[in-house]
Each structure stands twice: as C-alpha cells, then as structure tokens.
Image (cartoon, rainbow, N blue to C red):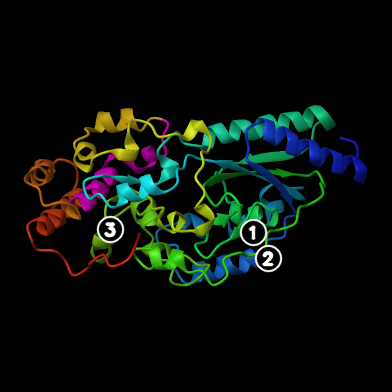
Amino acid sequence: MKALSDAALHALAEDIRGWAHDLGFDAIGISATDLSEAALALRKWLQQGWHGEMDFMDRHVQERTHPELLVPDTVRVISVRLGYWRDSGAGALETLRDPEKAYIARYALGRDYHRPMRRRLQKLADQITESVGPFSYRAFTDSAPVMEKPLGQHAGLGWLGKNTNLIDPKTGSWFFLGELYTDLPLPVDTPHSDHCGSCSRCAVACPTGALDTPYQLDARRCIAYLTIEHKSAIPESLRAMIGNRIFGCDDCQLVCPHNDSPGAGDELFSPRHGLEQADLVDLFNWSPKEFERYTTGSALRRLGYERWMRNLAVALGNGVPDEMVKKALQARLGKISDMVDEHINWALRRLNGHPDSATQTRGC
C-alpha cells in the first residue's frame, strides 16, 4: 500500500466511521498505542494479587501493554462498541429480588458476542482494504492480551469509571468492545474525561465490597469472577453474598446514573430460552445434555456443567427453604463431583436453619 496523505487519512477515518455504523456498531474511535499509564495500574493490580485465579492476566504483560509487540507495525487501534440487550433496569432488579429466580448477567442472556463481532470487524477490515489496498491489521474480540477498556477510553468511547467499566455519558456501559490493530497512521480521537465525580453508587451496591477502592476491582471478591472465572470452590464466607446470581453480576451497572435511560441493544443478544426469568430449581434440574442444548452459542457454555451446578447450589441455598428445593438438592448429592457436593451440603445446612456467619447486607 502506498503512503497516504494527511488529507487522505482523515477522509479514510470518516469513511471507516460510516462503514462501522452501517455494520451495526454503536460507536467507533481511533487511538494511538501508548498504554504507559494503564500498564502501571495493571502491574500494581497484579502485585496486589487482586486477579485471583486469573493467571492469564499475569502472562504476556508486555504484549498486553504494548500493542506493537503483540502485532508488529501497529501504530493505531480502531476500537468499536456494540450494545447488547438491556431494559430500564426494572426487570433485572425484580429478578435480583426474587429468591426463586436465577439472575444471569444481561450480556449472557443471548448469543455469545465473540464470533458475530469478529465477523463484523473482518467486514470492516475488508472495506478498508477495498478502499486503500492491502494493509496490516488484526481483529480482536476479547481473544488475546488486549487492554480493550483503556484503549476504548483513549479512542473516546467512554471513560473508565469507579466500577472499572468503560462508561459513555449518554448510553452508559451496556456494550461489548472490539478492536482492529493496524499500521494505518489514522488521526486519533479525543479521550473522554471522567464523569464519576463524587458518585459512589457502584461501591455501595457491590454485595461483596469488591469496589471499595475507587477505580480498582478486587476480583477475588467480585461475583462475576467468583461465578465465572473461579474454577474451584467458592469461599464459604462469600457464598451468602452471591444471592441468586448464577452467572456474573450487574449491580454496579444497574445503579450507575449513566445507565438510567431505557433502550435496546443489538437484537442478536436478546434473551433466549426464557433465561431472564428462569426458576433456580428448573435450571438445577437440567441434565448435562440439557445444559449443552440450552447453552449452545452462549457465554454460559464456558462454565461447564460442574460450575453451573455449583453456582446454582449456592443460589438455592440463599433462597426459600422449600421442601421441593431441598429434595432437588438432595437428589444431586453424589451425582456430579465432590466440589458440587460441598456446595449442595452448604445450601442444605442454610435451608435447614444452620447458616454460616456471612450475611448479605449490601447490594441492589
């Protein structure tokens, strides 16, 4: 590809915005590759051990913080935003407050975003190639050591809030991120300024205190980490605080004032199989084959059946001491694994009036 003039690069950047919009992306921004400030924060976070069992965060730190080391010749990052299903928050809050219902993070109710978003990024790259000829690029959708939130902030897609999510002042934080690393020296966008101010709603709402330090997340206490990334037994002191959340947690987003406006993201991510209103007992009664069938093409599949049942046992233990619930728990003892049995026995103790010392005193 021949070198492009500044005027041609500016025109190309505007074309890319138009193409991205036509592909269904909500927003697009362009940034340089300097992540020195984010690198310092990452290293401090890792040194504190706040990444828990996520050992992958401690690998490839240099590539994570230096895009040009991950993809040689990278000088710009094109970041895109894609909204997922959301409502005004009322439905989510009603589910959270119903001890018989299962709460699943809103992003995981529909189709897994990785492949659809990557396909759209590839189409965007194809349109750029058609316009200027072959160029160097690589598309990412949470698929490599990429610091997508700091890059998104630098690209003007939002600011990193006290809950560590990327937040847009108008549309909030209910979106996925994707990136194109490229050698095209495109003009960069202006980063967003911080709009959190003195607000502390997210920290107050967090059931486990994982956000007690503003702008930092102690993943070891985060319900999203505990129910998704954590591979072993959930610490007993935190189980009661999980409530009915069986996959992820949206509490810090549900209370964020920038998420107040109702809206709808891409229809591709609309809820499937009635999971937004599913009963805990019904899900706990799924066989391994039913789990496979109902989680096909879903982010839920990454849990595997064992951790799915672990999470459900905890949620049932935090619910109503109904005889049907107790029978469902007892019927699974010795059927799955020792880890699941541990959580089932914990749940039965609670339902039989012998709770542990932890109580849920925070949250939405």
Q: Are marks 2 and 3 in contact (CB under 8 Å)?
A: no
Q: Quadrant of the C terminus?
A: bottom left
Find the distance from the CA under tag 2 to the CA under tag 3: 34 Å
Relative to residue 194, is residue 135 depicted above or below?
above
Residue 27 in the image: state x and y as whole percent: 66, 43
- Mark before the other along the chain sequence, 1 or 2: 2
Find the distance from the CA under tag 1 to the CA under tag 2: 7 Å
Residue for badge 1: 65
Query: Residues in magenta?
Result: 297-316
Along the viewing direction, whichever of 241 and 169 lies nearer the viewer: 169
Q: Are marks 1 and 2 in contact (CB under 8 Å)?
A: yes
Q: Label 1 sits on what residue type?
A: Thr
Whether residue 1 sits left or right of residue 161 in the image: it is right
Q: Label 2 sits on what residue type?
A: Ser
Numbered disc 3: secondary structure? loop
Residue for badge 3: 234
Residue for badge 2: 36
> Looking at the magenta stretch, what is its main secondary structure?
helix
Along the viewing direction, whichever of 216 and 159 lies nearer the viewer: 159
- Mark before the other along the chain sequence, 2 or 3: 2
